[in-house]
Amino acid sequence: MTVVLLDTNILVYAFDRTEPEKRAQAMKIVLDLQVNPVGCLSIQCLSEFFNAVTRGAAPKLPIEEAVQYVQDYLLAFPTFPLTQSIVLEAARGVRDHSLSFYDAQIWASALINDIPFVFSEDFQDGRVLEGVRFVNPFTETFKLQKWI
């Protein structure tokens, strides 16, 4: 049963050598949510992941490796497309919940696809918006076993 949408920052931290603790945690989350099939992604997160790990003077991954990881993630996790309904729901999330538009798209993807939890450090830990709860997996109190 798919219950957790992984935000982009989880995927990026898995390759961030400058944040060893977050990297280890992110790698564990990605692997465990893949092995215990409770995780999912949105196309937006994969697009943001590719951009984040390949840009800048010192990219986290070479382009070819980033392409391979995107392909691997597509095979490993159910992935939700960015649809007209998600864009419209995200606009409502901006209006009604004061979310940034791209954060609202993550929320809308979870809401529309009946995913009750989003793992992200970009939202207030524990915040619930219309049945979607945001969980920061980088807090000291986070226990991955609770989710798998």
Image: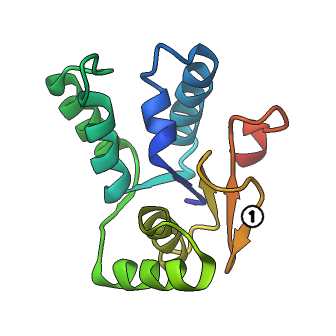
Q: Quadrant of residue 141?
A: top right
Q: How many marks?
A: 1
Q: Which amino acid does label 1 sit on?
A: Arg
Task: Between residue 101 and residue 120, name the one nearer to us.
Answer: 101
Q: In which quarter of the image is residue 63?
A: top left
Q: In this view, does 89 lie above or below 54?
A: below
Q: Which quadrant is the N terminus positioned in? A: bottom right
The spot of residue 65 in percent (x, y) is 21, 23
Tell me what residue is drawn at x 53 percent, y 26 percent: 27
The spot of residue 91 in percent (x, y) is 43, 82
Colour mapping used in the image: rainbow
Tell me what residue is drawn at x 62 percent, y 78 percent: 97
Local secondary structure at mark 1: loop
Crowd around label 1: few <14 · some 14–19 · many ≥20 (10 Å): few
Q: In this view, does 105 lie above or below 20?
A: below
Tell me what residue is drawn at x 35 percent, y 78 percent: 87
Task: Between residue 125 and residue 132, name the one nearer to us.
Answer: 125
Q: Which quadrant is the C terminus positioned in? A: top right
Task: Between residue 67 and residue 123, name the one nearer to us.
Answer: 123
Q: Which residue lies furthest to the left in this view?
A: 64
Q: Is residue 65 above or below residue 44?
A: above
Left or right of 144 on screen, residue 66: left
The spot of residue 109 in percent (x, y) is 45, 70
- Judging by the rendered image, the residue that carries numbered circle 1 is 127
The spot of residue 128 in percent (x, y) is 73, 70
Tell me what residue is drawn at x 40 percent, y 49 percent: 77
Task: Between residue 100 and residue 44, name the one nearer to us.
Answer: 100
Left or right of 102 on screen, residue 94: right
Left or right of 140 on screen, residue 52: left
